[in-house]
Amino acid sequence: MSDQIKFIVDNLNKEPFRKNYNLITFDSLEPMQLLQILNDVLAEIDPKQVVDIREEMPEHTAKRMLSLLGILKYKPPGNATDMSTFRQGLVIGSKPVIYPVLHWLLQRTNELKKRAYLARFLIKLEVPSEFLQDETVADTNKQYEELMEAFKTLHKECEQLKTSGFSTAEIRRDISAMEDEKDQLIKRVERLKKRVETVQNHQRMLKIARQLRVEKEREEFLAQQKQEQKNQLFHAVQRLQRVQNQLKSMRHAAADAKPESLMKRLEEEIKFNSYMVTEKFPKELESKKKELHFLQKVVSEPAMGHSDLLELESNINEINTQINQLIEKKMMRNEPIEGKLSLYRQQASIISRKKEAKAEELQEAKEKLASLEREVSVKTNQTREFDGTEVLKGDEFKRYVSKLRSKSTVFKKKHQIIAEFKAEFGLLQRTEELLKQRHENIQHQLRTIEEKKGISGYSYTQEELERVSALKSEVDEMKGRTLDDMSEMVKKLNSLVSEKKSALAPVIKELRQLRQKCQELTQECDEKKSQYDSCAAGLESNRSKLEQEVRGLREECLQEESRYHYTNCMIKNLEVQLRRATDEMKAYVSSDQQEKRKAIRNSEKNKKLYEKVMVQI
């Protein structure tokens, strides 16, 4: 426990926490402070957990921490009853609960950060089946699952790139170098385009070059396909030869063997396979299962400290002492029946061990035989690749040996002829040496005679003169040939220049006429342009004046329209009032009393209104 607390304190004092605790101050922390420290560690793993514990309800805190620990796959020690105590201890901030969690989190912070990051995107939202019956919800859920799978693949690729050793600086350098090469290639292409534009029919030539490139690419693709088909054919031939060899071996074994021997061999194979299936493989499977169960048990348990390991070692020593005591007690009894049974058990165990050893040897022999057969097939394929021939067997090998013997006799004869030629060559070489020596002696005698006669060096100078004269004649011939060639070249160049001049003369005449026309047209264009500019300026000023007049007339029209509508409304109002006044006069002048009562004039309420109307009239 002390090692655990020391590990927690050391990690909390480091980056990024920097708590400055020691063992005493950390052990004296209150439960609320311990929960805050645990929350800070969880916030370092998942930034969403940055919360002040004092401002949050304890139930919400426990629920949030338990959900995150479940995502991080933390397994508290104990069974289901201990889980309830773990939850209660997490709520109240119990040290026996908080310390193991902190120790587990601080041991694997980087791994848990990655797991928390992936949990944000890979924890699937469970949608009820009745909602999935809706098409839009089902399509959205399907799209959500596809995005989740795409995220998985992208994250794997990202991790592979991180571990592949590529650095961003190298990639940037490569990109900058590629961009420089691209600029250079663009410039080079532009220069080549400028060169090509001067050539006649350059478009047609470019088209032909493009077609040539396409055909070359197609040729490469076809060559690649041809190579692939050759490889496939080679593999198919190998499989065919392997099957044919197996067929030959099986036929050979069937031809030489009798039914009794075949049955005996099959019975042995059946016994061996049944032994492997019923006895050996089940034992190995059981041992593997036990080992797997033991490893799963070890993985499920929390991380063990030095004190836990010491306790386990003490338990193992106690159990070993108990086993030794039981063995001694059993040996002290020394019952005869047990002794006989132990003897038989020892013999049975020895036989079973021998049987297992032989089975393993047989299995190894079979594997070795299979590997040797594979090696033989590989070697045959290699020999076929080297010289294109197959490995000979049986009668073919005998015929090959007889051919080799006949060729060896021919080789011996040829070798003898070559030896004779070598001996003759030695003789000729010796005669050549003798003749050279004789020639040197004659030359020496000739020099001595020349010295005696007072004309030393005569023969040498004569030879040199002959050699120089021969060289001079050769040089003269070469000069004559070069002069003839140069004169012919000058004639050809003069004829070409005259032909080009005669061919370009009409073109030059046309070009002069076109240049004059171009000058005239440019002058006319300039004059028309100046006229157009002056006309456009006048029209623009007239247009602005007309627009101002139109704007003023539109405003006057709008005012007149408003005045017209106003006068029209007043006329209609006066017509209504006039109609009411005529009706009133008729009612007032009428002899009928009821009509007179209806008149507005007779009512007290409407006298003032009547007076106003009359005044208006």
Image (cartoon, rainbow, N blue to C red):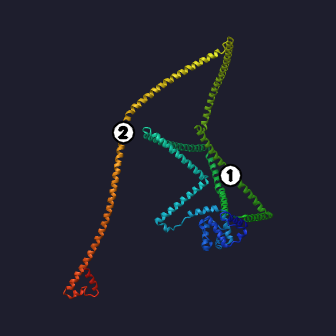
Secondary structure beneath dot 2 equals helix
The amino acid type found where label 1 is placed reads: Glu
Instruction: Please name the residue shown 62% across and 65% down the image.
Output: 44
Q: Is residue 604 left or right of residue 249?
A: left
Residue 360: mark in rendering: 1
The amino acid type found where label 2 is placed reads: Gln
Q: Is residue 479 left or right of residue 78?
A: left
Label 2, residues with CA under 10 Å away: few <14, some 14-19, many ≥20: few
Residue 168 vs residue 484, the one in the foreground: 484
- Quadrant location of residue 41? bottom right
Instruction: Please name the residue shown 48% across and 64% down the image.
Output: 138
Q: Is residue 301 visible?
A: no
Q: Is residue 242 visible?
A: yes
Nearer to us: label 2 or label 1: 2
Name the N-terminal-most of marks 2 and 1: 1
- Quadrant location of residue 55? bottom right
Q: Position of residue 188 (x, y in %)?
A: 51, 43
Split into 4 quadrants, where in the image is the N terminus?
bottom right
